[in-house]
Image (cartoon, rainbow, N blue to C red):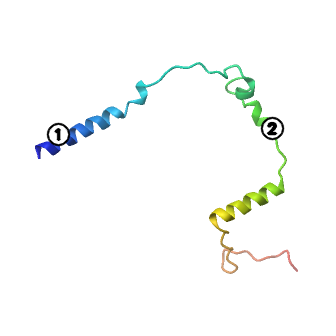
């Protein structure tokens, strides 16, 4: 009984001391991109210049991504055709 309590006490002390391990294990390093406007924009508080890039959507990429998703996770279950949650189709006449 005494041996178990000593082991538990030692394990709890190790756990408590390991909680603050990373706070003492830091090295201050200079920021290599400090003056890079592409990374930080005009100032560190502004949006980066990279965010201004706008890409046109490609339908081929969306179809390919959907095919890969269906292959990995299976095709999504079809939506219910009856019930109160399904709205009536008013566009078809």
70 to the left or right of 21: right
Q: Is residue 76 above or below residue 39?
A: below
Identity of the residue furthest to the right in this view: 93
Identity of the residue furthest to the left in this view: 2
**Label 1 vs label 2: CA separation?**
61 Å
Which callout, 1 or 2, points to the residue nearer the camera? 1
Q: Quadrant of the C terminus?
A: bottom right
Q: Quadrant of residue 8?
A: top left
Q: Count neighbours of disc 1 (C-alpha within 10 A) and say few if under 14, some if 14 to 19, many if 20 or more.
A: few
In this view of the protein, which residue sits in the foreground, 42 or 59? 59
Q: Which residue was labeled with disc 1?
A: 6
Query: What x and y, as percent, mark residue 50?
Result: 76, 33
Query: What x and y, as percent, mark residue 22?
Result: 42, 30
In this view of the protein, which residue sits in the foreground, 69 or 54? 69
Q: Secondary structure at mark 1?
A: helix
Q: Quadrant of residue 82?
A: bottom right
Query: What x and y, as percent, mark residue 39?
Result: 71, 28
Q: Which residue was labeled with disc 2?
A: 53
Q: Count neighbours of disc 2 (C-alpha within 10 A) and say few if under 14, some if 14 to 19, many if 20 or more.
A: few
Q: Earlier in the sequence, mark 1 or mark 2?
A: 1
Numbered label tally: 2
Q: Secondary structure at mark 2?
A: loop
Are the residues flagged by discs 1 and 2 in contact, CB closer than 8 Å? no
In this view of the protein, which residue sits in the foreground, 83 or 36? 36
Query: What x and y, as percent, mark residue 71?
Result: 67, 64
Determine the residue positioned at 35% across, 34% down: 18
Determine the residue positioned at 26% across, 39% down: 12
């Amino acid at each position: 009984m005494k041996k178990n309590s000593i082991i538990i006490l030692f394990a709890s002390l190790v756990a408590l001391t390991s909680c603050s391990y990373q706070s003492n294990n830091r090295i201050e390093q200079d920021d290599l991109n400090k003056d890079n406007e592409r990374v930080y924009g005009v100032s560190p508080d502004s949006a980066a210049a990279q965010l201004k890039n706008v890409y046109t959507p490609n339908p081929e990429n969306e179809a390919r991504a959907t095919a890969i998703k269906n292959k990995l996770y299976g095709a999504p279950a079809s939506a219910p055709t009856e019930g109160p949650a399904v709205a009536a189709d008013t566009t078809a006449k």
